[in-house]
Image (cartoon, helix red, strand yellow):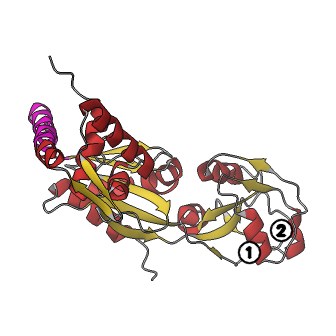
Amino acid sequence: MTQIPPLNSLRAFEAAGRHLNFRAAADEMAVTQGAVAQQVRHLEAHLGIPLFERLPKGLAFTSSGRSYHGRITSAFEELRNATASLRPEPDRVLVSVTPTFAAKWLIPNLPAFSAAHPQIDLQILATEKVSSFHGDGIDVAIRQGQPPFGASLEVVRLFRQEVIAVAAPSLLAGHDVPLSPETLSMLPKLHDAHDLWPGFLKMLKLEDRGGHGLRLSQTALTMDAALSGQGVALVSSFLAKRDIEADHLVQVVPETLLGEQHFYMLALRKPKRNSSAQAVIDWFTSMADASG
């Protein structure tokens, strides 16, 4: 009996064959270009024949590779169809987001979505990892980054990275707002993995004289620490909007640090998309900021 090649190698070959480009396949699968190339080499070694010709600007099928790709593509499509017929979920939409985006923006805004689309079962995958549209069944992803994201993806910028400094009213007791440069420099700072304080203080031409403060792995945690009065946090303004409007947080200085890592919605380009997934995409787009 002929041994079936590793599934990961077949997935990489199928994606690379559709794009005839390792980079585009890597964008689709949310892995590195080198990982895709390695999986294809493993498959060629397993089969004992070359499947692609490596060209300066992409790939070309060998005659055996073209024939094999057609059959592998049909096999994957049959697997997807078999799974869909076994467990049809036409109104299920899986959205991959970062934990901070989920906690500080998406969950507070979900009641508005549910009211408008009660028939859609919106499922949230909160992870720092970049999920695979094919491998993980992701319909829509929200990620902070910088284009380009890949030709196979539909991309909509939702929110600009406009970073502001915020703190709880309890921390600011006895101080006038906006804070003086001297006061801001002395207050404890809350740091996350983005490490934006050096750039923010440089913009204000200040030195940090308040110690290093608390260091946390996620922006959501620094916001929670700020809400409890433990220090000043740097956050994207749209994430803090609700807490500022509710007087739970205060923007301590008017300056804004403009970054290049904006928040984008990503979805696979498809000639025909499930109506529920399209409704989710349209809703996210309608909630985007209007800045250019």
Q: Are marks 1 and 2 in contact (CB under 8 Å)?
A: yes
Cα–Cα span, label 1 and label 2: 9 Å
Q: Which residue is mark 1?
A: 253
Seen at 90% across and 72% down, the residue is 182
- Viewer-closest of 179 and 141: 141
- Viewer-closest of 45 and 286: 45
Q: Is residue 147 left or right of residue 188?
A: left
Seen at 22% across and 49% down, the residue is 120
Q: Is residue 178 visible?
A: no
Residue 115 sits inside the magenta stretch:
no
Seen at 83% across and 56% down, the residue is 188
The single residue placed furthest to the top in the displayed view is 1
Q: Is residue 288 above or below residue 83?
A: below
Q: Earlier in the sequence, mark 1 or mark 2?
A: 2
The single residue placed furthest to the bottom in the displayed view is 292
Q: Is residue 104 visible?
A: yes
Image quadrant containing the C terminus: bottom left
The quadrant holding residue 248 is: bottom right
Q: Which type of secondary structure does the marked residue at label 1 adopt?
A: loop
Seen at 49% across and 54% down, the residue is 101
Q: Is residue 97 left or right of residue 174?
A: left
Q: Position of residue 163 (x, y in %)?
A: 63, 69
Q: Which type of secondary structure does the marked residue at label 2 adopt?
A: helix
Q: Is residue 179 left or right of residue 150?
A: right
Q: Which residue is mark 2?
A: 184
Amino acid type at image mark 2: Leu
Q: Position of residue 30 (x, y in %)?
A: 39, 49
Amino acid type at image mark 1: Val
Q: Residues within 10 Å of mark 2 (few under 14, many from 20)?
A: many
Magenta-colored segment: predominant secondary structure: helix
In magenta, the rendered stretch is 71-91
- Viewer-closest of 160 and 82: 82
